[in-house]
Structures are given as C-alpha cells and as structure tokens.
Image: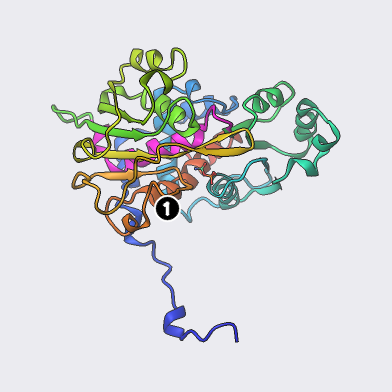
Amino acid sequence: MVNSSTSEELSFSRETPDVYGDAHPKALLKAIQEDGGYLKKLSSQHIVSCDQFDRQELLQLFRLAAKYESNPGRYSTPLKGKILISAFYEPSTRTRLSFESAWHRLGGDIMSITDRSTTGIAKGESLADVAEMFNNYGDCVVLRDSNEKSVQEMIESLRIPIINAGNGIDEHPTQALADLYTIFKWCPELLDDTKDIKRKIKIGIIGLPNKMRTVRSLLKILAYFPEYFEEVVIIHDKSEDAIFDKEQREQLEESGLNLRLSNQLNSNLPELDVVYINAIAWVGNDYESFGERFILDASSPLKSGGIIMHPLARGDELSPDLDHTPHNWYFSQARGAVFLRMALLTCMCERTELVMDVI
Ligand code: CP
C-alpha cells in the first residue's frame, strides 16, 4: 500500500494562492504607453548584461510582460515554428524551467542540454564551434554557464541571439528584469507621472554586490530608475571594501542611486519597503553561502506592507514561516519571471508585431 490518504486529503485547488502577492499587471498597461519600436531595437541584440538597456526598452518590456500576465491564454502562437536551444551547464530550477515554460506558452519548440558532457565539449570542442552549429539548429540560445566568459566566446560565432541566464559571479540579467517587473507590479504608483509628490521607496539588499550575480544585476537595473528609490541599503557582514568590485560602487552612485551600507539587519527592517535577500553565490562549480548572520522569519520586525523578494533557491536565511504572510513576494517574483521571459523571447525572435495593439 503506497498510502491511505482520503480523497479530501488529496484534493487541491488550481487557484493561484493569496501568498502570491497582490500584483497589478494591468496597472502597468495603463501607466506605460505602448511603443513597439523600442522592443524592435532589442531584437537585434544578444542579452548579456544589464548595462545594455535603456529606460524605454525596459518599460516596454515590462508592458509586454504585463500584457501576457494580464491575459495568459490570449497569445499562444507567436513563436510557432521557432526552436529554442536551452543550454544549462549549472543547476537551475527557475531560470531553465521558466524560460522553457515561456517558450512553450508562446508555441515554440525546444532542444534542451542540461549536461555539457553530452556534447562535443567533452571531446575538447570549442564553444565557438558549438555556437557555429547552434546557428543551424535553433533560433535563440539561452545559456547558463559558471564560466563568466562562455557567453562571450559563443557570441563570436553566433548569428542567432543568445541570452545570458547566469554566468558565474558576473550577471543574471533576466533575473534582474523579473525583479524590477515585480517591484513595479507591487507599486505601480512609482510609474505614475501625474502626481505632484512622487512615491519613492526604500529597498534593502541583503547580499554581496561583487559576489552574487543577482545582486550585481539588480543594482544595475535599479540604476536606470534612481528617482524611484529614496535609499538602497546594502546589508552585509564584510568589511566595506570587500563588497564592491573596483569602480562598481562609483558607477552606481554616478547613476544617481543613493546607496548606504549597513551591517545591521533588524534596525533597518522597519524602514524598508522592499527587502531583497540572497545568500548564495555560484563560484566555479560549487556554491558559497554568505551572510549566515542575517535571517528573516515571521518574528523579524518587517515594515507593515513591506515585501520580501528572493531570487531563490533559499536556505536558512528565509524561513518558510513567512510563506503565508503578506510579506511573501518571492513566489510572485518567480511566477512573474515567466511572463517577463515571454516578453523578452518575443523580441529576440522578432515576433513583437504579432502581439502589439498598434503597428
Ligand atoms: N533565480 C535563479 O536563478 O534560480 P535558479 O538557479 O533555480 O535558476
């Protein structure tokens, strides 16, 4: 006997639970005027770093993501006939499966490689040669590789777009896009230009900007919209000169971001509208855990109405006892990433005209 559960115990609901946060994708449709021209510009670029965007491209991407999220069943074929090469040489739950889910939801087909040793790389084949072959087999590549330089090595011979899905400790641009998309859905007033007094928020980031690709990329994305952030507090347990790469802090501050460093968590929490926490960095072929001192749980002095974000996977730093509180926006963040990736993939495959209201 495998189990003796009753049908009541085995019943489940298909409704998205309340713990997914009260997101407002439709509010983004109102706040951002559609302009597909910016999305067309994106279609001729590889996606490697958060440095490469401009504000209007980001807003249009978020608008298209919100359009997909507001009406998930409406567009099921924009990528019909297109093939994605999904190459993940490092463990992933969310990024690989959400990219693949996004592609499937848009009607495309997928070839997936989850172990580089099943390709010619195991026989010494260069990434440039592998990329040359990819040109013949697919229409877009999504690559996760712990080697920071792999994405650049492939670009040399690619004639189809590649998306960096995490390259070592360097960047994770689509995670950062999904993160800011989440913040705008949670607080669409940020985008409301009609008010005399503009809403600003305080965000705390528990993590290391020079070691965690999610944090590095998030800061770069926030730097496009410095006026929305009253303060960005980096909460860390290192010496101050050990948390930024050379010039990283200066570049962020030059953009207008108001950065503050702190090695205290609980004294900052009551002031923070958004708490972004991550404790893991992939270094080489393994992960290192940082910030064991900083743990969020249901007893943490979080601001009423404040939200928690986490790129996941989580460890002890984020207690499951927060999952059923209104502070939990990390599940909504992961869910929204599917729509954000749908928007990006539509651009990469030059299919935006199929989903624009006005052409
Ligand atoms: N957020 C993120 O990169 O998760 P995965 O490692 O599961 O892809």
Q: Main secondary structure of the magenta part?
A: helix
Residue 188 lies within the magenta run: yes
Quarter holding residue 272? top left
Residue at image coords 40%, 18%: 241
Q: Which amino acid does the dot numbered 1 rest on?
A: Asn
Q: Position of residue 234 (x, y in %)?
A: 33, 28
Q: Which residues are magenta?
A: 167-192
Is residue 141 visible in this depiction of the protein?
A: yes
Q: How is the image coloured?
A: rainbow
Q: Residues within 10 Å of mark 1 (few under 14, many from 20)?
A: few
- Judging depth in this view, the residue of 342 and 4 nearest the camera is 4
User: Would residue 116 appear left or right of 162 to someone viewing this image?
Assistant: right
- Judging depth in this view, the residue of 49 and 284 nearest the camera is 284
Is residue 29 visible in this depiction of the protein?
A: no
Residue at image coords 43%, 17%: 248
**Residue holding disc 1:** 71
Q: Position of residue 247 (x, y in %)?
A: 44, 12
